[in-house]
C-alpha cells in the first residue's frame, strides 16, 4: 500500500504529527523540499526517478497525485496532513489539482541529482518494459 495514515498527536493547544527517518517511512531522509504557490490547472512533477524514493504529504490544503508504473495509473487524494504517500523509484508521478493553499511536503531518499530524473515519458516506458 502506498498510502499511510500517521497518528495525530495533540491536545488543547493543537495537533502534531511526527515522522522519523527509516521508521515512519521506509527510507533514510536525505532531502526535503516543498511546493507551494501552485497555479490553477498547472500540474507539477511529470517525471520518474531511477533511484530516488519520495514520500509526499499535503501539510496544508489538498492535491491529487497520479502514479503510473507503465502499465496503469492510480490517483490518490492527499487531503489530510496525516496522509503520506510513498512514491517508489521508477514510478511516473504527477501532482495536480492543487488547492490554492496547498503546501506539498516531499521527503526524499537521495540528494538532488538531475541525472536521476526521467523526464521523457517514452523513455520511461522503454525503461520499465525492459
Ligand atoms: C516531485 C515534485 C513533487 C532543486 O534544485 N533541488 C531539488 O531538490 C528539487 C526538487 C528541485 N530543484 C530545482 C530543479 C528545477 O530547476 O528546482 C526547480 C524545479 O524543479 P522541478 O521542475 O523538478 O519541480 P517539480 O515541481 O516539477 O517536481 C518536484 C520534484 O522535482 C519532483 O521530484 O516529485 O516536485
Image (tube, rainbow, N blue to C red):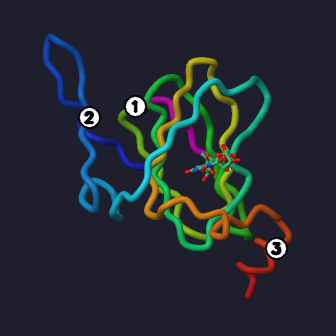
Q: CA distance from mark 3 to mark 1?
A: 34 Å
Task: Determine whether the residue tagged by mark 3 lies in a helix, strand or loop.
Answer: helix
Q: Quadrant of the C terminus?
A: bottom right
Q: Residue 64: x, y in percent?
A: 62, 38
Tell us which disc is closer to us: 3 or 1: 3
Mark 2 lies on residue: 17
Q: Residue at image x 67%, y 70%? A: 115
Which image quarter: residue 97? top right
- Taking 86 as reference, is 66 left or right? right
- The quadrant in which the N terminus is found is bottom left
At 52% across and 66% down in the image, what residue appears?
Answer: 52
Residue range highlighted in magenta: 76-80
Residue 81: mark: 1
Query: In the displayed image of the protein, which residue is found farthest to the left?
Result: 11
Whole-percent x, y for residue 94 in the image: 69, 48
Q: Is residue 32 above or below residue 15?
A: below
Is the residue marked by circle 2 packed among few (<14), some (14-19), or many (20+) residues within 10 Å? few
- Dot 1: what SS? loop
Q: Which of the labelled discs sits on residue 123, or is there none?
A: 3
Q: Secondary structure at mark 2?
A: loop
Q: Earlier in the sequence, mark 1 or mark 2?
A: 2
Q: Are marks 2 and 3 in contact (CB under 8 Å)?
A: no
The residues tagged by marks 1 and 2 sit, at their Cα atoms, a distance apart of 8 Å
Tell which of 1 and 29 is nearer to you.
Answer: 29
Amino acid at each position: 500500500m502506498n498510502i499511510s495514515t500517521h497518528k495525530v498527536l495533540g491536545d488543547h493547544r493543537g495537533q502534531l504529527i511526527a515522522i522519523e527517518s527509516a521508521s515512519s517511512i521506509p527510507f533514510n531522509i536525505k532531502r526535503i523540499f516543498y511546493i507551494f504557490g501552485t497555479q490553477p490547472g498547472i500540474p507539477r512533477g511529470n517525471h520518474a526517478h531511477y533511484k530516488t524514493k519520495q514520500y509526499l504529504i499535503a501539510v496544508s490544503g489538498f492535491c491529487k497525485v497520479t502514479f503510473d508504473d507503465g502499465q496503469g495509473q492510480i490517483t490518490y487524494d492527499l487531503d489530510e496532513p496525516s496522509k503520506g504517500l510513498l512514491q517508489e523509484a521508477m514510478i511516473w508521478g504527477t501532482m495536480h489539482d492543487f488547492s490554492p493553499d496547498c503546501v506539498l511536503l516531499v521527503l526524499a531518499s537521495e540528494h538532488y541529482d538531475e541525472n536521476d530524473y526521467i523526464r521523457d515519458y517514452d523513455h520511461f516506458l522503454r525503461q520499465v518494459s525492459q
